[in-house]
Image (cartoon, rainbow, N blue to C red):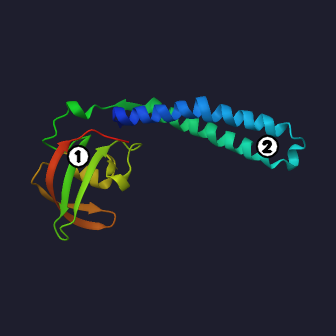
Amino acid sequence: MEKEPMTNVGYEKITGDLEFVKMTERPETVIALEEARQLGDLKENAEYHAAKDKLKLIDIQIAELGAIISKAVIVDPTVLAHDRISFGSTVNLIDVDTEEEFQYTIVGSVESNPDVGLISFNSPLSKQLLGKEEGEEFTAHLPNGKKVYEILDVFYKELVL
């Protein structure tokens, strides 16, 4: 089975999501389904079919979250040295051509959210960043072409999801 590294913050979020879906969302949907069933003719009962479809989606979500949790390997970035870029490192980069600055934190794929600067350790940029140090300049080969970056800063900061 393929293991999936993630931070403790990410693990707590996923297990919290699973707990909420199992203990709150699913029971509420089961009740809604039962109430809709009592409304009569099931062939033309939109509430019944909607609740039944929602229950199916919830069960899929529970299975998916359970699969993620079963593959999880919690990596504690606080114990890693961040003199070189590693899992959990936050890195400040500058695009040498445009002078645009970026900040990214390298996290597990289930935690990734590029819109807020959280990139998966599996992403093309992360793979090229890992092991590099502050002050290094490198050419990143990305899906949208080549970019030359300079690494301004490498450090650890607490993750907030």
* Label 2, residues with CA under 10 Å away: few <14, some 14-19, many ≥20: many
Residue ranking furthest to the left: 135
Q: What's the residue type where badge 2 is placed? A: Tyr
CA gap between label 1 and label 2 equals: 48 Å
Q: Residue at x 83, y 38 (%)?
A: 37
First-in-chain label (1 vs 2): 2
Residue 43, position as x, y percentages in the image: 87, 47
Per the rendering, the mark at residue 90 is 1
Q: In this view of the protein, can residue 29 be seen by the observer?
A: yes
- In this rendering, position of residue 14 left or right of residue 60: left
In this view of the protein, can residue 3 be seen by the observer? Answer: no
Can you give x and y, in whole percent of width and height, for residue 110 in the image?
42, 42
- Secondary structure under tag 2 reads helix
Crowding around mark 1 (Cα neighbors within 10 Å: few <14, some 14 to 19, many 20+) is: many
Looking at the rendered structure, which numbered label has been put on residue 48? 2
Q: Is residue 60 toward the left or the right of residue 77 in the image? A: right
Q: Secondary structure at mark 1?
A: strand
Q: What x and y, as percent, mark residue 126?
A: 27, 50
